[in-house]
Image (tube, rainbow, N blue to C red):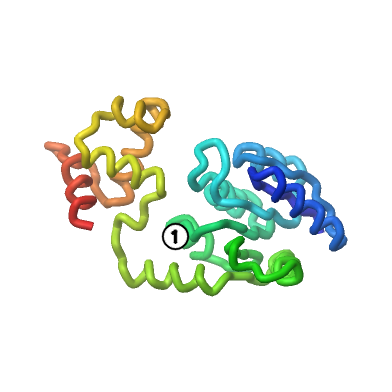
């Protein structure tokens, strides 16, 4: 099986490469950021990607968002997410339509190498490999139905700073991002909280109220 690895921890990336090669797979590329992941997938058209969630450029949910793009552009590509935590919003999207060729494992809960390699084989063969903890958290999220759960970690961070009364420029300085990036995050927040533009446009206030009520 031809595999691409996306993992920003250099030792783990090298270790995964060695394990997969020793198991008879071909690692066609190993990258440390989400942007390069999309580039090498387009170049190599692998059978499968092993993807971390948190990686550059923002170290939030870049890997998982890239995985969603891969499934959209190359739906036959298997995706095995290997992470330290469950990013509920995008994990739910990844599993929403078709779980064939999808896996989501938590690094700290993998008991042995054989378990990991078995998951690789299942996902590569069009099956599913989900950690029970991932399933439990996604089911709990579905029961809560809290609109704030739709927000990414970065969007929740931006909304928290909005609740402190920070301006867009102050938020950009606090998070060390561009003013345009903050505007994009706020636009996403309004969309995910179902706050369309109105004549008086009090969406910023309404978004903060949702945050305070949560």
Residue 208 position within the rendered picture, expressed as x and y whole percent measured from the top left? 20, 45
Residue 45 position within the rendered picture, expressed as x and y whole percent measured from the top left? 75, 48
Closer to the camera in the image, 100 or 84: 84
Closer to the camera in the image, 184 or 156: 156
The residue shown at (74%, 44%) is 30
Quarter in which the N terminus is drawn: bottom right
Tag 1's secondary structure?
A: helix
Question: Where is mark 1, residue-wise?
Answer: 88
The residue shown at (41%, 28%) is 176
Q: Residues within 10 Å of mark 1 (few under 14, many from 20)?
A: many
The residue shown at (39%, 33%) is 175
Quarter in which the C terminus is drawn: bottom left
Q: Is residue 213 left or right of residue 32?
A: left
For this orientation, the residue located farthest to the left is 200
Residue 207 position within the rendered picture, expressed as x and y whole percent measured from the top left? 22, 46
Compared to 136, does 191 lie above or below? above
Compared to 109, does 61 lie above or below? above
Closer to the camera in the image, 13 or 73: 13
Callout count: 1
The residue shown at (23%, 51%) is 211
Residue 66 position within the rendered picture, expressed as x and y whole percent measured from the top left? 57, 46
Compared to 9, does 165 lie above or below? above
Quarter occupied by residue 164 = top left
């Amino acid at each position: 099986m031809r595999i691409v690895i996306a993992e920003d921890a250099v030792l783990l990336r090298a270790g995964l490469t060695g394990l997969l090669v020793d198991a008879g797979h071909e690692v066609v590329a190993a990258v440390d950021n989400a942007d390069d992941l999309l580039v090498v997938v387009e170049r190599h058209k692998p059978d499968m990607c092993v993807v971390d969630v948190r990686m550059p450029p923002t170290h939030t949910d870049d890997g998982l968002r890239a995985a969603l793009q891969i499934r959209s552009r190359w739906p036959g590509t298997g995706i095995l997410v290997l992470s330290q935590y469950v990013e509920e919003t995008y994990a739910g999207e990844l599993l929403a339509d078709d779980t064939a060729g999808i896996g989501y494992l938590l690094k700290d809960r993998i008991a042995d190498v054989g378990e990991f390699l078995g998951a690789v084989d299942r996902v590569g063969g069009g099956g599913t490999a989900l950690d029970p903890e991932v399933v439990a958290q996604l089911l709990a999220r579905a029961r809560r139905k809290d609109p704030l759960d739709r927000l990414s970690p970065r969007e929740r961070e931006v909304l928290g700073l909005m609740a402190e009364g920070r301006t867009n420029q102050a938020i950009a300085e606090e998070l060390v991002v561009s003013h345009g990036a903050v505007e994009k995050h706020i636009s996403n927040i309004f969309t995910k909280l179902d706050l369309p533009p109105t004549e008086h446009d009090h969406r910023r206030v309404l978004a903060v109220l949702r945050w305070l009520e949560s």
